[in-house]
Image (cartoon, rainbow, N blue to C red):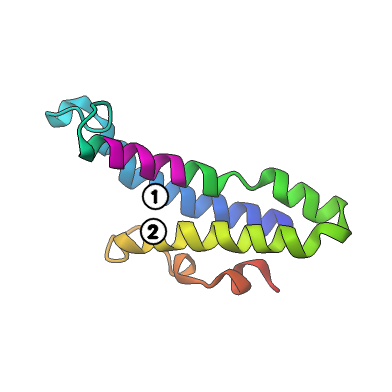
Amino acid sequence: MDKDIQQRFERITAFVEARLTPLFDPENGSDHGFGMDDTSRALRALRYTVQAASAVNGLLEKRASAPELRQVVDQALEHNWDVLRSIARMWEDHPDFQKEFKGHSWDVLGI
């Protein structure tokens, strides 16, 4: 079960990263994320948010090894999924968008 959850997090993260990465390409004609303008700062903040929300391996390990922490771990996983889901849905019309990215955290975590 946790392997499935990890794979779902990996898929949604890959989808979002694939949308963000081109915005940091200097060949696009601007600082795109590397400058100190507000757009660059917003891009960096979004990327950091995605990276933080997708870092679930340690949580999944705790979920399996510390049943007394299960409720807290599940809450953290739910929050992280909801953050990624909200970001991914900005590209809901993209051909690579998968239906599972719309799934609520309780569906993803099976709780």
Q: Residue furthest left?
A: 29
Q: Quadrant of residue 31?
A: top left
32 vs 49: above or below:
above
Amino acid type assigned to the residue bearing label 2 in the image:
Ala
- Residue 1 shows in this picture: no
- Cα distance between the residues tagged 2 and 1: 6 Å
Residue for point 58% across, 69% down: 105
**Badge number at residue 51:** none
Amino acid at dot 1: Val
What residue lies at 51% left-to-right and 63% top-to-bottom?
82
Query: In x, y percent, where is residue 58?
Result: 71, 43
**Where is the N terminus found, in terms of image quarters?**
bottom right
Q: Which residue is mark 2?
A: 88
- Whether residues under marks 2 and 1 lie with C-beta atoms below 8 angstroms apart, the answer is yes
Q: Which residues are magenta?
A: 41-49
Is residue 108 in view from this perspective?
yes
Q: How many marks?
A: 2
Q: Which sits in the foreground, 62 or 1?
A: 62
Location of mark 1 (residue): 16
Q: Is residue 43 magenta?
A: yes
* Disc 1 packing (10 Å; few <14; some 14–19; many ≥20): many
Report x, y in % for residue 86.
41, 63
Q: Which SS class for mark 1?
A: helix
Compare marks 2 and 1 and give the one earlier in the sequence: 1
> Magenta: predominant secondary structure element?
helix
Q: Is residue 61 magenta?
A: no
| 44 sits to left or right of 61 | left
In front here: 40 or 60? 40
Q: Position of residue 10 (x, y in %)?
A: 54, 49
Q: Residue at x 28, y 60 (%)?
A: 94
